[in-house]
Image (cartoon, grey):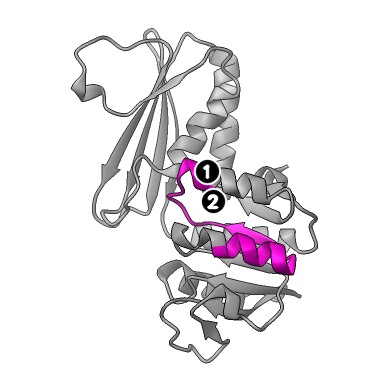
Amino acid sequence: MTKLIITGANGKMGRVIQDIVAKRDDCEIVAGVDLNTESNGNFPIYSSINDVAEEADAVIDFSNPVLLDDLLAYSKKTDTPIVIATTGYSGEQKKKIQDASKESPIFFTYNMSMGINLLANLAKKAVQVLGDDFDIEIVEKHHNQKIDAPSGTALMLADAMCEEIPNPMKYEYDRHSKREKRTKNEIGMHAVRGGTIVGEHEIIFAGRDEIITLSHSARSKEVFAVGAVNAACYMKGKPAGLYDMKELID
């Protein structure tokens, strides 16, 4: 039985994770962390990770980037693996995660969906086959409450493709401010925000007289919760290091 701590326990994703775990017999939630400490009757909820008294096999974080330092310190102090599912980290914070993984077991990905991570692998294969004869554009769509743009997932997809492209590429976020034709060494990024769109990502490979499109559409937040819980169970007992969805897909 994998014992879990959930940060952001009373948030939308925290509640979805509770529903997912309740239907499984291989894990249980022993404590939660949230500024809203209202009890749900199933496990204690603390206002800070530093106040948690229960021992756990992994922490699932769906909270806020400002809590990163406390989470990393807790992981190092208790040797507890952390599954980081929060988005919107700065470059400096991503560097902290990488550095912390040298001493702590950390699972970090921009998107917990198995489908999205499969999409990244398919995109890499497409780049290998198509070469530089096709222009690449990424369109991502999310709900009107999402703060960061482009999405971390869109950046993850672009980064994955760049691993297969020998020439340095630049990400073009603001093409409307320029009056010049598209260059070959760019990947266009386009963000759409509206309504309650959970998350849609489309990769367009535009060549001469043909277009290839790879896409993924998340219909509910449950796909991210399932991925996070699977990752947490996988991380039980793992040594220090930086892990991601490749370990679950391979």
Q: Judge whether residue 79 is colored magenta.
A: yes
3D distance between C-alphas at marks 1 and 2: 5 Å
**Spot occupied by residue 221 in the image (x, y as percentages of width and height):** 44, 60
| Region rendered in magenta | 70-93
**Spot occupied by residue 145 in the image (x, y as percentages of width and height):** 28, 57
Answer whether residue 6 is visible to the viewer in this image.
Answer: yes
On screen, residue 2 versus residue 201, left or right, reads: right
Amino acid type at circle 1 is Ile
Q: Secondary structure at mark 1?
A: helix
Q: Give the class, few, some or many, for how many residues have Cα within 10 Å of label 1's Cα (few <14, many ≥20).
A: many
Callout 1–callout 2 Cβ contact below 8 Å: yes
**Spot occupied by residue 85 in the image (x, y as percentages of width and height):** 53, 56
Q: Which residue is mark 2?
A: 113
**Spot occupied by residue 242 in the image (x, y as percentages of width and height):** 69, 47
Q: Judge whether residue 120 is colored magenta.
A: no
Q: Residue at x 48, y 79 (%)?
A: 47
Amino acid type at circle 2 is Ser
**Across the whole image, how many numbered discs are drawn on residues?**
2
Q: Which residue is mark 1?
A: 116
Q: Residue at x 45, y 84 (%)?
A: 37
Q: With respect to residue 151, does 165 lie above or below?
A: above
Res 80 quadrant in image:
bottom right
Q: Secondary structure at mark 2?
A: loop
Res 122 quadrant in image:
top right
Q: Nearer the viewer, residue 57 or 99?
A: 99
What label does residue 150 carry, if any?
none
Q: Nearer the viewer, residue 223 or 164?
A: 164
On screen, residue 135 versus residue 5, left or right, reads: left
Q: Give the class, few, some or many, for how many residues have Cα within 10 Å of label 2's Cα (few <14, many ≥20).
A: many
